[in-house]
Amino acid sequence: MKVSAYGLTRLSPLPKRSVAPERSQALDTVELSAERPQSISGWVRAGAAVALLGASLGCLAGPSTPGLIAASATPAEAARLSQRYKRVDPKILQLLVNDGVQVEVVRPGQSFMQTGVLPARSLADFQAQMGKMQATAKAVETATAPYARGIARLQAQGLDSGQLQRERRSVLLDTLPHDSLAVPFSIPSLAGLLRDGDGLHKLAQQQKMPKGTTLMAQLVGARTPAQIQEYTRLVEAINGPRLEQARQASLATATPAQQQAWSKDPGQIPLDLKGYDILVPDLAYVADGQGGTARVSLLDASVHGAWADSNGKAIKNSSINGQYFTQSRRILVQSSKVAPQPGQSHSHTPLHELGHAVEDSVSRHDPRFYGSWHSKVFIAYQGAVQGGTVSEYAASNVAEYIAEGVGHFYEDPNLLRQKDPKLFELTRQLLERAAQL
Ligand SMILES: [Zn+2]
């Protein structure tokens, strides 16, 4: 998937950022019964209890999940989604509603941004976060300084610094806050995500263009000189004098011809990214499908690249079934995945995506529980991948392993217990904690 390229650089060491869109092979080969009774005591009454709650609140969003299902779902779709969520403990549904989680339905041809799951951020949003982004850049600099010095020493001696480079990257990622709007600069991954039609990303992937701030701006979709300048100013403000230091370090090793070429525009001077950790705003200029340009975060833009074309129109035959957005707390379900398709007994997507949202809520409300629980999940995940006991999709990363656990837990707990008892038990623990919050 295109998103996974981005995930490798930024997301994978931070398990809470579960943004990988769902592919078709969400299930293993075993067919699950759509309406098999829950074996977990107490939860069989969930549907009735939520229906009562819905009646008492007089909510119109859905027959049995008040507030959870957004207006983008038709009444028929809302009813079908509610049917899926009848299996879920009503306390958990209430937690999600309290946390502002909503389930949206997106259908082919629909403008992606119009669904509201891809919020357009204004430049002011980023400027308001400038203090935080600068603090993040400072924290990264402090944390990675020993590695930068070690790398410089090794390079001066002509020795391989690859291992230290990787460790520095890992420290950098660990230092970034969960909700950081300042992220490490990484051209190829992002460029691929934006589905840029003008071939810029191909050039960048081939590393044929200097990694200067002008290229950075172009790669996140800035087209006009004003947009490029606007983006460059943000990068300068976040990094302070380090940006110029990174330029000077490149200039020091440049040929006279290169210096001549770059002298016209400081934005053309490549940044020494081996010596300096330069952070960029998590921002992309994305066409909004109405002839304008909306500014969104890179995280959202990566999702956009997977779901929509460059005009903001949903891709008709996208293989992605659903998506959970940590930032806007939206669950997105393809309209074709709301209900079982002909010949299928179930639709897995709504409960799988709900699993991502539950994990996210628990991580926010009880980080202490989440930390120890997640380390156990990680061990179980590694065991399951090595043992080959999980579907290809669940094996793609820990977040998908968990979401698959939740989906199967509700659809067929006995099957899950039989196939992966550790995941069954850890899923049970997660849901038990979620019901207490
Ligand atoms: Zn998923």
Image (cartoon, grey):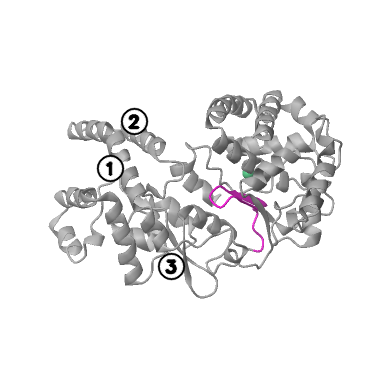
Secondary structure category for the residue under label 3: loop
Q: Which mark is residue 198?
A: 3
Residue at mark 3 to residue at mark 1: CA–CA distance: 28 Å
- Asked whether 389 or 420 is in front, the reply is 420
- The label on residue 274 is 1
Q: Earlier in the sequence, mark 1 or mark 2?
A: 2
Q: Are marks 3 and 2 in contact (CB under 8 Å)?
A: no
Ligand 1: which quarter? Answer: top right
Mark yes or no: residue 263 visible.
yes
For residue 163, the mark is 2
Identify the secondary structure beneath mark 1: loop
Residue furthest toward the front? 56
Q: Which residues are magenta?
A: 316-331
* Number of numbered tags placed on the structure image: 3
Determine the residue located farthest toward the bottom in the rendered image. Answer: 291
Determine if the C-beta at disc 1 is less than 8 A from ligand 1. no
Q: Is residue 340 visible?
A: no
What's the CA distance linking mark 3 and mark 2? 36 Å
Q: Residue 318 location, x and y as percent?
A: 64, 58
Q: Are marks 1 and 2 in contact (CB under 8 Å)?
A: no
Q: What is the CA distance from the residue labelled 1 to the residue labelled 2?
A: 13 Å
Q: Secondary structure at mark 2?
A: helix
The residue drawn where x is 83% and y is 30% is 39
Image position of 153 (left or right of 425): left
Task: Identify the mark at residue 197; answer none if there is no mark.
Answer: none
Residue nearest the observer in this picture, 198 or 226: 226
* Amino acid type, callout 1: Lys
Residue 262, image x, y percentages: 20, 62
